[in-house]
Image (cartoon, rainbow, N blue to C red):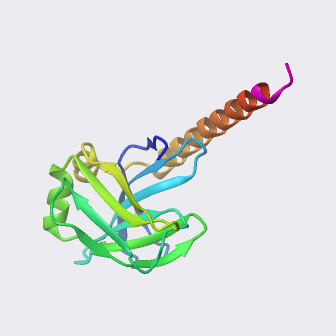
C-alpha cells in the first residue's frame, strides 16, 4: 500500500435552502495516494436536532461488496456495515454513530477500516484520530476555506503526478 496523504479533520455545517431546513454538520477527513485517488474517506454526519448520527466510510471502487466493511477504533470491538451505494469516487458504508462511538473517536488514536479487495485480499486502511475531537467540538470551518484547501491539495497532487511522469520519461529516454 503506497503512503497516504491525509487532510486534516474539518467540520463544516450547511443548511438547505428551504425555509424550515435543518442544519447538518459534517466532520471529515480523507486519505489519498500521490495520484490524488481517494483511498479512504471518513465523515461523521450530524443532522441538527436529529437523533441519528452516521459515521460514513468511503473506500475506492474495486472492493468486494458482499463482505462489506469493518471499522475498529484503537484495536477495540470491530463494527461491521454493508456497502450502501457506490459512486465513481468510491463505495460507502454507514455506521450508526452512537454517543459511545463518538466518545471513542474523540479519545482514539486510530480508526482502522477493513475491507476485501477484488483479488480477495484483506485491506486495512488507517484513519488517524488525534485531531478529531478538536474539529468535532470546535466551531465549523467556512465552506469557502475548505474549498480553497481542496484546490491546493489537488494542485499538489497534479504537481506530484507531473514530476513522476517527467522522472519516468527521463528514465525511459535512450542513453
Q: Position of residue 84 (x, y in %)?
A: 44, 79
Q: Position of residue 127 (x, y in %)?
A: 34, 51
The quarter of the picture where residue 73 lies is bottom left
Query: Residue furthest toward the top?
Result: 175
In the rendered image, the vertical position of residue 130 relative to residue 13, given as above or below? above
Asked whether residue 96 is in view, the answer is: no
In the rendered image, the vertical position of residue 31 relative to residue 55, given as above or below? above
Give the magenta-colored segment's residue range: 171-175
Side of 152 relative to 169 (left or right): left
Side of 161 relative to 98 (left or right): right
Residue visible at 22% across and 49% down? 133
Residue visible at 37% across and 78% down? 82
Residue visible at 24% across and 45% down? 134
Asked whether residue 170 is in view, the answer is: yes
Marker count (numbered)? 0
The quarter of the picture where residue 75 lies is bottom left
Residue visible at 43% across and 81% down? 66
User: Magenta part mainly helix, strand or loop?
Assistant: loop
Q: Quadrant of the C terminus?
A: top right
Q: Position of residue 124 (x, y in %)?
A: 36, 56
Query: Residue furthest toward the right?
Result: 174
Q: Position of residue 83 (x, y in %)?
A: 42, 77
* Residue 172 lies in the magenta-colored region: yes
Amino acid at each position: 500500500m503506497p503512503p497516504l496523504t491525509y487532510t486534516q479533520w474539518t467540520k463544516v455545517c450547511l443548511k438547505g435552502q428551504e425555509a424550515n431546513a435543518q442544519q447538518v454538520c459534517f466532520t471529515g477527513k480523507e486519505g489519498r495516494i500521490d495520484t490524488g485517488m481517494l483511498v479512504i474517506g471518513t465523515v461523521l454526519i450530524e443532522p441538527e436536532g436529529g437523533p441519528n448520527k452516521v459515521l460514513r466510510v468511503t473506500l475506492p471502487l474495486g472492493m468486494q461488496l458482499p463482505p462489506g466493511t469493518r471499522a475498529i477504533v484503537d484495536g477495540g470491538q470491530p463494527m461491521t456495515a454493508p456497502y450502501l451505494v457506490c459512486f465513481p469516487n468510491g463505495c460507502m458504508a454507514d455506521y450508526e454513530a452512537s454517543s459511545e462511538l463518538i466518545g471513542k473517536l474523540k479519545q482514539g488514536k486510530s480508526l482502522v477500516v477493513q475491507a476485501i479487495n477484488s483479488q480477495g485480499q484483506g485491506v486495512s486502511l488507517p484513519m488517524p484520530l488525534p485531531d478529531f475531537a478538536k474539529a468535532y467540538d470546535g466551531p465549523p470551518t467556512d465552506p469557502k476555506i475548505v474549498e480553497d484547501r481542496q484546490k491546493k491539495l489537488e494542485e499538489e497532487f497534479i504537481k506530484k503526478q507531473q514530476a513522476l511522469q517527467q522522472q519516468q520519461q527521463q528514465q525511459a529516454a535512450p542513453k
